Amino acid sequence: MSKLEYTSFSSPLSEITGKELMTKLRWEEIGGRLVLFIFSFLLERHAIWSRYPDDGFNPLEYYNERTPLIKRFNEIANMVDGALKEIEQLYGIS
C-alpha cells in the first residue's frame, strides 16, 4: 500500500465526521497545506505592498538582493513547490 492510499474515502468529504477525518489523515499529509497556510499568512503584506504600493513606495527599490525575502526566495519556492506536490499526491491530481 502506498503512503497515501488509505486516505481514500468511501463517502463524500462533506459526510465524514471530524474524528474519522483526523483518523485517516497523518501529520505529514496535513503538512503541505500547513506550509501554504503559514506562507500565505507571512507573505500577505508583501503581496499587498508589491501589487498596490502606497504613494512614494516603489517595490522595485525595496525588493532587492539584500532583502531577506529575496535572499531566501529559492528556499521558499522549493518549500512551496514541495507542499504543492504533496497536496497533488494526496488528492491524486498528478
Image (cartoon, rainbow, N blue to C red):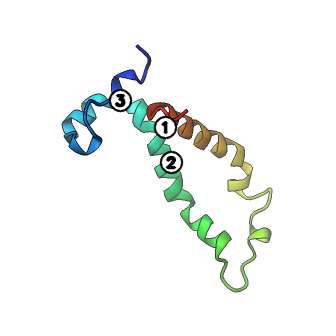
Evaluate if marks 2 and 3 touch, with contact meaning CB atoms under 8 Å apart: no
Q: Residue flagged by tag 3: what amino acid is it? A: Arg
Q: Position of residue 4 (x, y in %)?
A: 41, 24
Disc 2 is placed on an element classified as helix
Q: Is residue 4 above or below residue 34?
A: above
Going from the N terminus, do you reach mark 1 or mark 3 first? 3
Q: Identify the residue shown where x is 42% and y is 33%.
A: 29
Indicate which label's residue lies in the foreground, 2 or 1. 1
Read off the residue under disc 1.
Answer: 87
Q: Position of residue 21 (x, y in %)?
A: 26, 36
Read off the residue under disc 2.
Answer: 36
Q: Is residue 42 left or right of residue 59?
A: left
Q: Identify the residue shown where x is 71% and y is 44%.
A: 74
Q: Quadrant of residue 57?
A: bottom right
Q: Is residue 48 left or right of residue 4?
A: right
Badge 2 local density, few (<14 within 10 Å), some, or many (20+)? some
Disc 1 is placed on an element classified as helix
Q: How far apart are the alpha carbons under marks 2 and 3? A: 17 Å
Q: How far apart are the alpha carbons under marks 1 and 3? A: 13 Å
Q: How far apart are the alpha carbons under marks 2 and 1? A: 10 Å
